[in-house]
Image (spheres, rainbow, N blue to C red):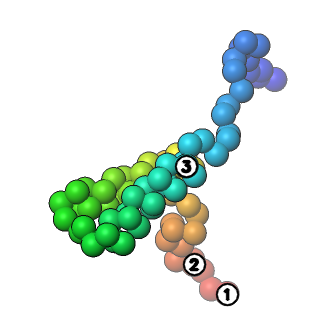
Amino acid sequence: MNTIDHDPNEPPIDRGPGPWRWVLLVMLTTVALNVYTGEISWPSFIGGVGVGGVLIAWAIEITGNKVPDSWRSKPPRSGRS
């Protein structure tokens, strides 16, 4: 039987939520203030790009950069039912 060597001093994997909730809150507040004050301009555009980048980074971290099974196409059924 094969055995796997484990490092007894290996730190546990961090599965916490990370800073994403606070980062999203700050980004959404910034966008809301831009909309409220009517200052939609290049800084607002760059802020929107930043919010999108943070959302993408969060999604990649949460999914482990794996495509969810629900997004995968199903192979055609072979044979007769």
Q: Which mark is residue 22?
A: 3
Disc 3 to disc 1, C-alpha distance: 52 Å
- At x 67%, y 41%, the residue is 16
Q: Which mark is residue 81?
A: 1
Answer yes or no: do the residues labelled 3 and 1 have beta carbons within 8 Å? no
Q: Earlier in the sequence, mark 3 or mark 2?
A: 3
Left or right of 28: which side holds 9? right
Can you say whether 17 is above or below 34 in the image?
above
- At x 69%, y 21%, the residue is 11
Answer yes or no: do the residues labelled 2 and 1 have beta carbons within 8 Å? yes
User: Amino acid under label 3?
Assistant: Trp
Q: Earlier in the sequence, mark 3 or mark 1?
A: 3
- At x 41%, y 67%, the residue is 32
Q: Residue 40 falls in which quadrant of the image? A: bottom left
Residue 68: percent from left, percent from top: 56, 61
Residue 63: percent from left, percent from top: 56, 51
User: Amino acid under label 2?
Assistant: Arg
Badge 3 crowding class, 10 Å Cα cut-off, few under 14, some 14 to 19, many 20 or more, is few
- Dot 3 falls on a residue whose secondary structure is helix
Please name the residue that numbered disc 2 is placed on. Answer: 77
Asked whether residue 5 appears in the rendered view, the answer is no
User: Amino acid under label 1?
Assistant: Ser
